[in-house]
Image: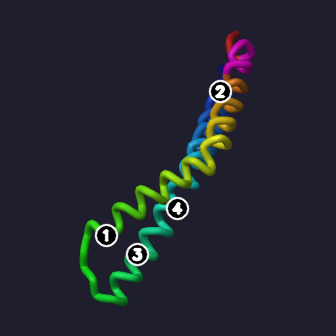
Amino acid sequence: MDDVTLIEIARQTMMVALQLSAPILVTSLVIGFTISLFQSMTQIQEFTLAFVPKVIGVGIALLVSGNWMLHTMITFTTDLFERIPSLIR
């Protein structure tokens, strides 16, 4: 295995990790920003107010994108395992 192949595998791994974490992180970010904006407009400074909506939002995001996430992980892992014979010299 040469260094170019190793860097390509690492790059693909990081891209898959970014793709898989994006729906959850974006959902959490949008809900957190919305609740923070609401808290600043109403001057309610309750730190636990954002927790329950974030948990519900992340749960819904996992339900909606879970099938795609699982398919992406399986495809990446299958491609990686199929590439193993060509990596051994």
Say whether marks 3 and 1 touch (CB < 8 Å).
yes
| Screen quadrant of the C terminus | top right
Residue denoted by label 2 = 77
Q: Amino acid at mark 2?
A: Thr
Tell me the SS state at disc 3: helix
Q: Alpha-carbon distance for marks 4 and 2?
A: 26 Å
- Sooner in the amino-acid sequence: mark 3 or mark 1: 3
Mark 4 and mark 3 lie on one chain; the one further toward the N terminus is 4
Point 31% across, 69% down: residue: 49
Label 1 or label 2, whichever lies nearer to me, is 1
Q: Nearer the viewer, residue 73 or 5?
A: 73
Dot 1 or dot 2: first in sequence order is 1
> As shown in the figure, which amino acid type bears the numbered disc 4?
Thr
**Cα–Cα gap, marks 3 and 2:** 38 Å
Q: Which residues are magenta?
A: 81-86
Q: Quick one: 85 or 32, which is closer to the camera?
A: 32
User: Would residue 72 appear left or right of 14 to someone viewing this image?
Assistant: right
Q: Residue at x 36, y 89 (%)?
A: 41
Q: Earlier in the sequence, mark 4 or mark 2?
A: 4
Cα–Cα span, label 3 and label 1: 8 Å
Residue type indicated by callout 3: Ile
Q: Quadrant of the N terminus?
A: top right
Residue 58 pos. (x, y %): 48, 55
Q: Residues within 10 Å of mark 4 (few under 14, many from 20)?
A: some
CA–CA distance between discs 4 and 3?
12 Å
Q: Are marks 3 and 2 in contact (CB under 8 Å)?
A: no
Which residue type does callout 1 highlight?
Leu
Other residues around mark 1 within 10 Å, as few (<14) / some (14–19) / many (≥20): some
Residue at mark 1 to residue at mark 4: CA–CA distance: 16 Å
The residue carrying mark 1 is: 49
Residue under pointer 3: 35
Q: Residues within 10 Å of mark 2 (few under 14, many from 20)?
A: few
